Amino acid sequence: MTDVPYVRNYFRETAPAWLDHVALLAAFAPPAREHGFSWCDLGCGPGTNAAIQAATHPQGSFVGIDAMPCHMEDASRMAGDAQLSNIRFLLTDFRAASELDFGGFDYIVSHGVYTWVDRTAREEWLGFVDRHLKPGGLLYVSYNAMPGRAADLPLQRLVRALGSVHTGDSRDRVAAAMVTVESMLALKTPALVASPFLNWMTRRKELFDPAYLTHEFMVAGWDPQCVTDVRAHLRSVGLQPMGSATLLDNYDRFVLGGASREVLAVIEDPDARELARDFLIDQFFRRDVFVREGRRIEDAERRRRLMQSTFFLSEAPDRVEYSLTTPAGRLNFDNAASRHIVKGLSEGPRRLVDIADASIIPDADLLANALTLTAASVIWPVEGGEVSVEAINEVIGDAYEVFPCGTAKRRSQER
C-alpha cells in the first residue's frame, strides 16, 4: 500500500539488548558491541522504531529502509528534529538496497514485512539479508504464521475483494468493505464467525487504526507461512533459527501441557517439531531470531552473561502480578526470588548480579526466576548505561515514553 502511511510503532523486541538476550537463551554469543555496532530496519515504515533505537543507542550506527516516500520524509524529519546523527533513512526497495555498500550489519530487523509482500519481494528481501548480515549477526523477522492465521485467510481475501470495487483511497476502501463484513458477521456467516482476528477486532475496535487495517487487508501478498517454510528459506542463505523474540515462546513448559510435551518428545526433526508445536498452541504470529555463523557458548559463560545483563521493571512494583495465564495453564512465580528481583529493580534498571549481591538467595534461583519474569514480560532486558532521551521524547510526543536504558513503551501503559 503506497497511498496510506502505516501507523507509527515501536517494537521493544528489536532492541539490541532484547535480541542479545534471545541469543544467550539459545547459548549463542551475541554480536560484540564494545566498539560500536550496526543495525538495520528493513521495511521500517515511518521510522519511529528505528529513530527510538538510534536515540537510545548513540554508540550504534542505524539505517532505516523503506520504499514509501511519505514514510522516509516523516522519518528523516523525525531524525532531524531529534538531532540524531547516527541514523540515515533510505528511500529504496529491497533489490536496489541489496546492491548498496553498508559494510555489513550486526542486526537486521524486519517487522510486519515478510508475509505482507509477494514472492518476488521476499526473494529480494532475502537477497538483502544474505549480502548484508555479518557473520555472528542476528536477524529478527516477524510474520503471520500458520496454522493460527488459517481461519483469517477468507476474511482477508473478502475485505480486499470488497474494497477493490469501492472508490477513494485504500483507507476508504477498507472502511466500506468492513461495513459489508460486519453485516455478514451479524448473519453468522460461518467463515467470518471462525475468524479470530475479526472477532477480536469486533470486541476491541478502539485498538485498530484504519491505517493498520489498510496495510493488513488490502495487500495482495498477504500470505501466512509455516515455520518450516520460513526456516528453509533462510537456511538457503546460511542462517539458522535461534529462538523467539516473544520470550515466552522459548519455554515448552510454560506454553505446553504435559500431554503436548509428550507428543513432541517423539519428533526428532527440530523443524517438524516446531511446526507441530505451532499446531498445538495454534500459533498465529511469530517473531523469530536467526543467526549467521553463530558461536556457541558453554553453559557457564551463558549463565555468567545472563547474570551480568541489565533488566528494566515494566510496571510499578505494586502492579506486578506474580502469575500469568498461558496455553499450558496458570504460571505462578510468587516467591522470594521473584519479589527480591522486582524490589531490586523498583528504583531503576540494574544488573542481575548486583541484585544477587544484596541477597542470600542462590544465584541459580535468582536467574531462573529472572528468566520467568522476562517470559512473563514483567522485566525486560535493556542496556546497562543511560543516555539522554529528552529530545526524542519531545519528538515522539504522546505516543511513547522513551527510557534512558534503551527501551520505550506506550504512554497509555502506566508504569
Image: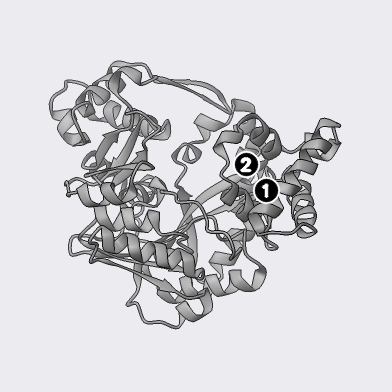
The x, y position of residue 60, in whole percent, is: 25, 62
Count of marks placed on residues: 2
**Relative to 387, residue 257 above or below:** above
Q: Does the image show residue 200?
A: yes
Q: Secondary structure at mark 1?
A: loop
The numbered mark at residue 283 is: 2
Marks 1 and 2 close (CB-CB < 8 Å)? yes
Between 145 and 303, the one nearer to me in the picture: 145
**Relative to 129, residue 366 above or below:** above
Position of 57 compared to 173: left or right?
left
The residue lying at 26 percent from left, 37 percent from top is 311
Q: Tell me the kind of residue under disc 1.
A: Met
**Relative to 51, residue 274 above or below:** above
Q: Quadrant of residue 360?
A: top left
The C terminus: image quadrant: top left
Between 24 and 219, the one nearer to me in the picture: 219
Q: Residue furthest left?
A: 358
The x, y position of residue 346, in whole percent, is: 22, 26
Q: Quadrant of residue 192?
A: top right
> How much space separates mark 1 and mark 2, taking CA atoms?
6 Å
Q: Does the image show residue 292?
A: no
Q: Secondary structure at mark 2?
A: loop
Position of 98 compared to 2: left or right?
left
Please name the residue that numbered disc 1 is placed on: 146
The residue lying at 40 percent from left, 59 percent from top is 47
The x, y position of residue 250, in whole percent, is: 47, 41
Q: Tell me the kind of residue under disc 2.
A: Gln
Q: Residues within 10 Å of mark 2 (few under 14, many from 20)?
A: some
